[in-house]
Image: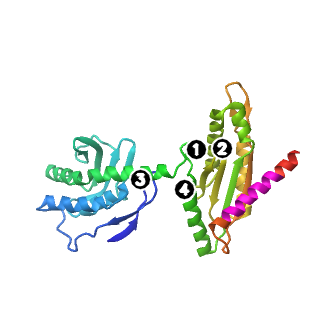
Amino acid sequence: MAAYRTTLRDSLIEPYSCRLPLAAVTPARHHLPADTTAFSFELMLAAQRCTDPLSVLNELFDRVSQYLPIDGVAWRQEHDAIYTQNFTTGTDFSSPAQWVELTHVDVRLGKLGVSAERVLLASELVWLHQVAQSIAFSLRNSMLYQRALSEAQQDPLTCLKNRRAFDVQLIREHAQCVRYGIKSSLVAMDLNSFKSINDTWGHDVGDRLLKLFATGLSQILRETDHAFRFGGDEFCAILPATNAYGAKKMTDRLNAWLGQHELQLQSGEQISIHTAFGVAESESGGDERDWFRRADQSLYDNKRALKRVAA
């Protein structure tokens, strides 16, 4: 079996998926197979080995396109939509020649769409519907699996990645830095006087403050950067291909953003967010744990310096 990587058109994680090889001899296109049951069974086995919806759709497309003049396939369930690369048809679900309903034991599992070179014949559409039913359950399960993976690595309050995701990404980023000799930066952050805010206004206000900070951090970072809620009022950011100077510029932009976005209470009071930062560049001589220790130490050095200034 050959392994390949896919990307989804949503926030799900990119998994590795295994695909069964297609038959060595390509059948004549536009002629439906004589044994639909055997064809559907082989497709079902291939789909069951996929761990993400796009892989399932690719398996369907690779096999069905040998018999039907289709360019791509798509699947939509409630608010989830997955498309193969060459799917070009719009999202007009009113066209019966392009969309078929998927079900499993009378449970509706969404709609399958095809982008075809021509309008499919009624017999072709019936065959496609029959074949697609064989992967409907795998399609739904793969989506639920990916959603569970995403939620397992996401902080539910701030919607940033959590500590588990941080540990994985830090190892990956450090390995990239060592292999390619590039400098990346790790930024450790926490909110100053957060405990006193909880004690004074309650944990609901504290939660709102954390979400506001996470919003600012997400808006300041680039698409290639990674933001994490490490725990409590502690946050981290991994900035690929960024030296310490660039990381310091990021903290300056975040401070400026926070200065313009105070938390407004119903009483009319406003709470400002003040943050301490610690920055550390990656080093080829250490490991990812040493990288984090240096960023953490820089954070506490910064906090002690701020306390001396305040005193």
* Residue 171 in the image, given as x and y percentages of width and height: 57, 65
Q: Which residue is mark 2?
A: 213
Element type at marker 4? helix
| Residue 247, percent from left and from top | 70, 59
**Residue type beneath disc 4:** Arg
Give the spatial CA distance, label 3 vs label 4: 16 Å
User: Residue 70 is drawn in which quadrant?
Assistant: bottom left
Magenta stretch contains residue 299: yes
The residue tagged 4 is 164
First in residue order: circle 3 vs circle 4: 3
Viewed as shown, does residue 148 lie left or right of 36?
right
- Residue 158 tag number: 1
> Residue 45 appears at what percent x and percent y?
25, 61
Q: Indicate the secondary structure of the residue bearing disc 2.
A: helix
Q: Nearer the viewer, mark 1 or mark 4?
A: 4
Magenta range is 291-304
User: Of helix, strand and loop, which one carries label 1?
Assistant: loop
Q: Disc 1, disc 2: CB below 8 Å?
A: yes
Which of the marked residues, 2 or 4, is nearer the chain's N terminus?
4
Q: Residues within 10 Å of mark 2 (few under 14, many from 20)?
A: many
